Amino acid sequence: MAKFLEKGSKSYSILNYKCPRCHEGDLFKTPMLSFKKPFEMYEKCPVCEQKYVLEPGFYWGSMYVAYALSGGWMLSTFGICFFVLGIHPLVSVGIAAVGVFALYVWIFRTSRSIWINLFVSFKAFVTKKA
């Protein structure tokens, strides 16, 4: 496996939605494709007890990350549809918009995972408090 996807790297924690401190506990209570409470997060890591909300309103900043992810999706999808495939501009925008709505849960979870990983570092051999 590529080194940047191994445990101990930020990308491992972000892409697997794991605790940024121990890389063991999950950030979210349900699987990605769960239709029951897909946005519900744990308050703290079930393994190392790292708090996931570092301060009130902590995840407001993840909106900027979500904006970048959705904007990147819209621009790249529109560019491929319009410039490469030659699809009409309005249809290209529609395809891109449908894609953003379909990826909403992924964008939400990934932006939160990126945001918390900006502020919490990996610490090997962290054990749960007794």
Image: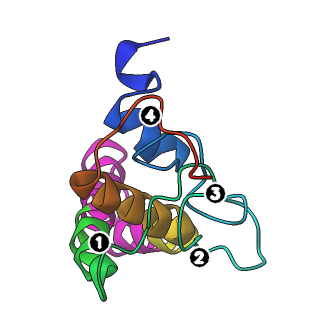
Task: Look at discs 3 and 2 and give the one toward the viewer.
Answer: 3
Instruction: Read off the magenta span.
Output: 69-97
Q: Residue 60: x and y, percent?
A: 27, 82
Helix, strand or loop at disc 4?
A: helix
Q: Residue 75 at x, y = what percent?
A: 24, 59
Which of these two is toward me, 84 or 50? 50
Query: Which residue is the site of mark 2?
Result: 39
Horizontal side, residue 50 vs residue 86: left or right: right
Tell me the CA gap for discs 4 and 2: 20 Å
The residue shown at (63%, 57%) is 46
Q: Nearer the viewer, mark 3 or mark 4?
A: 3
Q: Amino acid at mark 1?
A: Ser
Q: CA distance from mark 1 to mark 3?
A: 22 Å
Q: Which residue is mark 3?
A: 46
Q: Report the coloring of the rendering.
A: rainbow
Upstream in sequence: badge 3 or badge 4: 4
The answer for how far apart the CA atoms under marks 3 and 2 are is 17 Å
Q: Which residue is mark 1?
A: 62
Q: Residue furthest bottom?
A: 56
Q: CA distance from mark 2 to mark 1?
A: 13 Å
Query: First in sequence: mark 4 or mark 2?
Result: 4
Q: Secondary structure at mark 2?
A: loop
Tell me if mark 3 has few (under 14), some (14-19) or many (20+) residues whose alpha carbon lies within 10 angstroms of its own: some
Instruction: Say which of 108 and 26 sits in front.
Output: 26
> Is residue 22 among the parts visible in the rendering?
yes
Residue assigned mark 4: 12
